[in-house]
């Protein structure tokens, strides 16, 4: 029997996934959580074979949860199941050690097959996303440029960003200018949106 942990912040979706996966003869859902920062504790407690996780969750996102699993419980295979079919998210998920990446409109039979495949040691990736990720390439943003753009996404001032990230205002302006140029945007808020849409943040 394959033991599965579900991490999904929408209770209705989580319940539906649980019910559908429990119909599979060889899969049992041993735990489900609604926050990314509860994944590691649940995995330690319930010893799943596979953790199926959304990307956007409170506490921490599914990609960071997958990173934690790879570091602390490498035997637990991470499968990202998300509404956000963005090539950048796929690339980041693979970089942190996720073994699967599917979009939520995939049929449940496809998810069940993916769970079986990752337990068998294979990687399972949505084909369209894989092609798009190869075409897009990796993020052009440096880690610090990405940090500054994240801080700018809500319209924060240069002074606010500088204070939050312990940088000088001049340094923040330089990072923002570089990020705006690399994303082809006109403003820092637009640059943050473009980078988020591509999964670079």
Image (cartoon, helix red, strand yellow):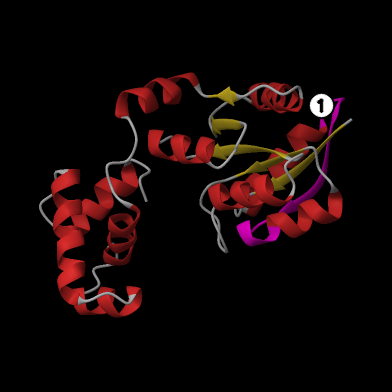
Q: Is residue 174 magenta?
A: no
Q: Residue at coordinates 32% horizontally, 59% vertically from top-left?
A: 144
Residue range (magenta): 23-38
Query: What residue is at 67 percent from the left and 21 percent from the top?
Result: 122
Q: Nearer the viewer, residue 31 or 95?
A: 95
Which residue: 64% across, 52% down?
Answer: 68
Quarter-of-image position of residue 119: top right
Label 1 secondary element:
loop
Q: Nearer the viewer, residue 137 or 63?
A: 137
Q: Say whether residue 108 is left or right of residue 141.
A: right
Q: Is residue 159 left or right of residue 165?
A: left
Q: Counting other residues with Cα less than 10 Å from the Cα at mark 1, is it few (<14), some (14-19), or many (20 or more)? A: some
Placement of the N terminus among the 4 image quadrants: top right
Which residue corresponds to the image point at 67% horizontal and 49% vertical from the top-left? 71
* Picture quadrant where residue 50 is located: top right
Query: How many numbered circles are shown?
Result: 1
Occupied quadrant, residue 163 = bottom left
Q: Where does the image place residue 121, in percent across and percent down from the top left? A: 72, 24
When the figure is inspected, residue 89 is found, relative to residue 170, above or below; the finding is above
Give coordinates of residue 24: x percent, y percent: 81, 26
* Residue bearing mark 1: 24
């Amino acid at each position: 029997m394959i033991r599965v942990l579900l991490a999904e912040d929408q209770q209705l979706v989580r319940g539906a996934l649980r019910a559908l996966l429990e119909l599979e003869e060889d899969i049992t859902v041993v735990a489900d959580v609604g926050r990314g920062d509860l994944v590691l504790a649940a995995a330690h407690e319930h010893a799943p074979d596979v953790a199926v996780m959304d990307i956007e969750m409170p506490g921490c996102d599914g990609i960071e949860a997958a990173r934690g699993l790879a570091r602390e419980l490498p035997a637990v295979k991470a499968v990202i199941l998300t509404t956000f079919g963005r090539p950048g998210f796929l690339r980041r998920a693979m970089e942190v050690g996720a073994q699967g990446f599917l979009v939520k409109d995939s049929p449940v039979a496809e998810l069940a097959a993916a769970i079986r495949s990752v337990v068998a040691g294979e990687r399972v990736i949505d084909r369209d996303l894989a092609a798009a990720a190869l075409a897009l390439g990796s993020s052009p943003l440096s880690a610090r440029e990405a940090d500054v753009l994240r801080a700018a996404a809500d319209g924060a001032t240069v002074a606010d960003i500088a204070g939050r990230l312990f940088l000088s205002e001049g340094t923040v302006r330089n990072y923002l200018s570089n990020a705006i140029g690399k994303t082809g945007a006109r403003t820092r808020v637009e640059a943050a949106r473009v980078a988020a849409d591509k999964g670079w943040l």
